[in-house]
Image (cartoon, rainbow, N blue to C red):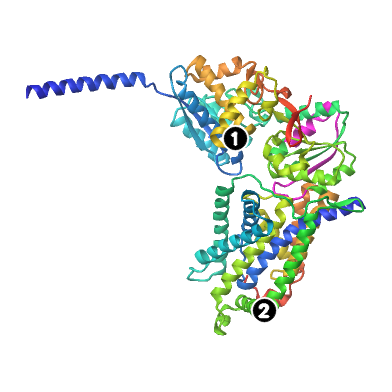
């Protein structure tokens, strides 16, 4: 029982990381139907810049957090203004290729600034891990799960209750129609980039104390976060979170009961199986799938 | 008119004499090649190696070179890639006509250079650890290496465990070349030391939580955990080990030897044991230890110049280059003689990695005595007796 619980908690810890990254993918997707493959780099920027403010400049936690989110927001703003906006032809595949290029550039810049070493700072609350029936769960994991839940609620409210959120969704479904009803499509795209970058930065800030952060962690985070988003159904905030936890727990259980060498393979095979039977993901609907542009 | 001609004559005479003199005195420098993974995934190896090599070159040339001849080191970046390493070595051999090559940084790259170096009859002193680089020694006539064997690190750990009456162990290793080699050495050497491996777990280089693997090891009844990795993985394992309060000791590989790891793991690192080269614990050595003076000078110089610790990896480049330099000093610029000198005359030779004893049977020259068992205590290293 203890061992099973420990595997479960370990899976929750891993899954929480994937879930948070997965959330970021959804925001841009919801506003533009593009997949921002530089999302992993924003997570890394969040973690490393937070380290810079908190450990190097020695600012208080909340100030560092605000500055980190601002910095990441500005980076995303520049990314969108310099690479996405100047495009004459808004081809989805082209835009996705651009995000890949941006991710490579960002990784290079991060390496120059921070070097190749990993970084870490203290967890949000100091103290012993919690014990439940002999299994332990780290306090930081609870923080991550809590923050993830808050983010889902906020994102849900934003996209379904505010005019801005609804306008952003309209842009994804049909940019031309959105423009006709007077929505400033370009501005919506810009806002979605900034928002999703901030989302990624929050994830980075939260996960660095347990997983450490180094300049080239982005691609792995992006792949796992993207898998989480796909598993839950792209565009569904709640779906990507549950998808993330499912993948994390699957990995942990495979490592525990089969072998740790197989964990990535098994998690991905199950992801593929889900997509065979429910191509829209666990929470996506068929109607939504038909609306997807690719 | 006459005067002008006389002037010209003197001018040319002086010009030619000076020209002749300078060509006599400014000797052609000894050319040594270096192939390091300065960029790419293995750059954490290549960077300190490159820094060390450049620093030593400046020091040697400032002190008058080798018997009056300066050295020139041509560094090529392999970009952590076997193909690039081969191209770099070919360039060094064919275009620059180097006397010897030091590097490459990784085992894969070194293996790729073996046939080329043997064909070119030029010594290679590798900075990578894999046993296959220098074994079988018959087919590695021109190849040497300076890092300790993985097997030696494993033997140092097992010897220490035996003293602690530990016989059931769980191992967890990273799924990279470093982890594969270490895992193989751990499995191969276990019967010889009477160790039973009750769990054999893996993890990926970017994984963020290894609690599952550790829980499994504990449940399998291990008396100690050995983690074999470099990079952030070893810090995460250490943190998870401390959080789980496993109650059994954690041993790390020789990749643990950086103060950075203690900083990152914080209190969790207390009590972690690892076999480390003496470079990281030079200040804890007795003054009479043959390695102490050179380790002190190298560490101090490196820290002053590059504002960071040289680490074990920079030390490998130090040893490789200094072996070539010593051979050049004794036998001059002759590839065959350099090779023979390194093979037969590097005996009881203190380097950063240990005290080398090269022989026609062993082109590495280090064994488990190159390591000290070191425990983390109060945020610092402490040598275990």
Distance of label 2 from label 1 (alpha carbons)? 56 Å
Q: Secondary structure at mark 2?
A: loop
Q: Residue B220's spot in the image, x, y percent? A: 89, 42
**Do the residues at discs 2 and 1 belong to one chain?**
no
Looking at the image, can residue B342 be seen? yes
Dividing the picture into quarters, in which one does residue A179 lie? bottom right
Q: Residue B112's spot in the image, x, y percent? A: 59, 34
Chain to which mark 1 belongs: B
Q: Residue A254's spot in the image, x, y percent? A: 82, 52
Looking at the image, can residue B126 be seen? no
B18 vs A160, left or right, is left
Q: Residue B55's spot in the image, x, y percent? A: 52, 30
Task: Give above or below for A85 relative to B287.
Answer: below
Residue in the picture at 48% in, 17% down: B332
Residue range of the region highlighted in magenta in the rendering = B182-209
Q: Which quarter of the rendered picture does the C terminus of chain A lie within?
A: bottom right
B220 vs B250, left or right, is right
- Residue under circle 2? A162
Q: Residue furthest bottom?
A: A181
Task: Give above or below for A185 relative to B318.
Answer: below
- Residue under circle 1? B105
């Amino acid at each position: 029982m203890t061992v099973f619980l420990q595997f479960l908690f370990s899976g929750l810890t891993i899954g929480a990381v994937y879930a948070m990254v997965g959330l970021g993918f959804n925001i841009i997707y919801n506003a533009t139907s593009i997949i921002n493959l530089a999302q992993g780099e924003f997570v890394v920027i969040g973690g490393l810049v937070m380290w810079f403010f908190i450990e190097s400049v020695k600012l208080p936690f909340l100030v560092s957090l605000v500055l980190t989110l601002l910095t990441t927001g500005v980076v995303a703003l520049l990314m969108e203004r310099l690479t996405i906006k100047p495009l004459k032809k808004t081809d989805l595949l082209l835009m996705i290729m651009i995000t890949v290029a941006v991710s490579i550039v960002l990784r290079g810049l991060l390496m120059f600034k921070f070097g190749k070493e990993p970084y870490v700072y203290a967890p949000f609350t100091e103290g012993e891990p919690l014990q439940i029936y002999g299994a332990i769960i780290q306090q930081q994991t609870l923080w991550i799960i809590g923050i993830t839940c808050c983010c889902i609620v906020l994102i849900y409210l934003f996209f379904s209750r505010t005019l801005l959120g609804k306008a952003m969704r309209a842009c994804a479904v049909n940019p031309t129609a959105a423009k006709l009803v007077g929505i400033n499509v370009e501005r919506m795209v810009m806002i979605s980039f900034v928002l999703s970058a901030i989302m990624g930065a929050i994830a980075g800030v939260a996960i660095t104390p347990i997983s450490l952060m180094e300049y080239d962690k982005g691609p792995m985070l992006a792949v796992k976060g993207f898998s989480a988003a796909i598993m839950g159904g792209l565009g569904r905030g709640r779906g990507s979170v549950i998808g993330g936890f499912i993948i994390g727990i699957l990995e942990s259980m495979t490592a525990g009961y089969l072998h740790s060498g197989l964990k990535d393979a098994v998690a991905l095979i199950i992801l593929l199986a889900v997509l065979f039977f429910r191509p829209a993901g666990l929470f996506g609907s068929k109607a939504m799938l038909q609306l997807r542009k690719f | 008119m006459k005067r002008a001609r006389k002037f010209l004559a003197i001018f040319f005479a002086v010009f030619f004499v000076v020209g002749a003199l300078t060509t006599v005195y400014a000797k052609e420098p000894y050319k040594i090649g270096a192939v390091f993974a300065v960029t790419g995934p293995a750059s954490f190896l290549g960077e300190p190696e490159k820094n060390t090599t450049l620093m030593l070159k400046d020091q040697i040339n400032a002190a008058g070179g080798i018997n009056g001849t300066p050295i020139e080191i041509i560094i090529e970046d392999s970009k952590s890639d076997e193909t690039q390493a081969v191209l770099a070595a070919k360039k060094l051999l064919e275009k620059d006509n180097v006397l010897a090559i030091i590097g490459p940084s990784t085992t894969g790259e070194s293996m790729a250079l073996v046939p080329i170096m043997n064909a070119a009859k030029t010594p290679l002193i590798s900075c990578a650890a894999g046993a296959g680089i220098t074994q079988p020694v018959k087919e590695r006539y021109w190849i040497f290496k300076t890092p300790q064997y993985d097997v030696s690190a494993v033997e140092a750990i097992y010897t220490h465990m035996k003293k602690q009456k530990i016989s059931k162990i769980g191992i967890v290793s990273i799924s990279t070349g470093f982890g594969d080699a270490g895992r193989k050495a751990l499995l191969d050497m276990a019967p010889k030391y009477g160790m039973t491996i009750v769990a054999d777990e893996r993890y990926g280089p970017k994984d963020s939580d290894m609690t599952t693997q550790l829980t499994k090891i504990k449940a399998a009844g291990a008396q100690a955990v050995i983690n074999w990795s470099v990079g952030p993985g070893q810090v995460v394992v250490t943190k998870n080990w401390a959080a789980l309060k496993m109650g059994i000791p954690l041993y790390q590989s020789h990749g643990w030897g950086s103060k950075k790891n203690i900083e990152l793991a914080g209190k969790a690192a207390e009590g972690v044991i690892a076999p480390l080269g003496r470079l990281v614990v030079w200040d804890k050595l007795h003054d009479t230890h043959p390695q102490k003076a050179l380790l002190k000078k190298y560490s101090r110089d490196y820290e002053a110049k590059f504002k960071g610790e040289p680490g074990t990896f920079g030390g490998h480049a130090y040893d490789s280059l200094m072996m070539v330099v010593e051979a050049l000093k004794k036998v001059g610029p002759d590839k065959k003689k350099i090779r023979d000198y390194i093979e037969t005359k590097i005996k009881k030779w203190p380097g950063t990695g240990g005290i080398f004893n090269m022989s026609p049977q062993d082109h590495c020259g280090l064994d488990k005595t190159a390591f000290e068992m070191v425990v983390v205590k109060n945020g610092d290293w402490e040598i275990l007796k």
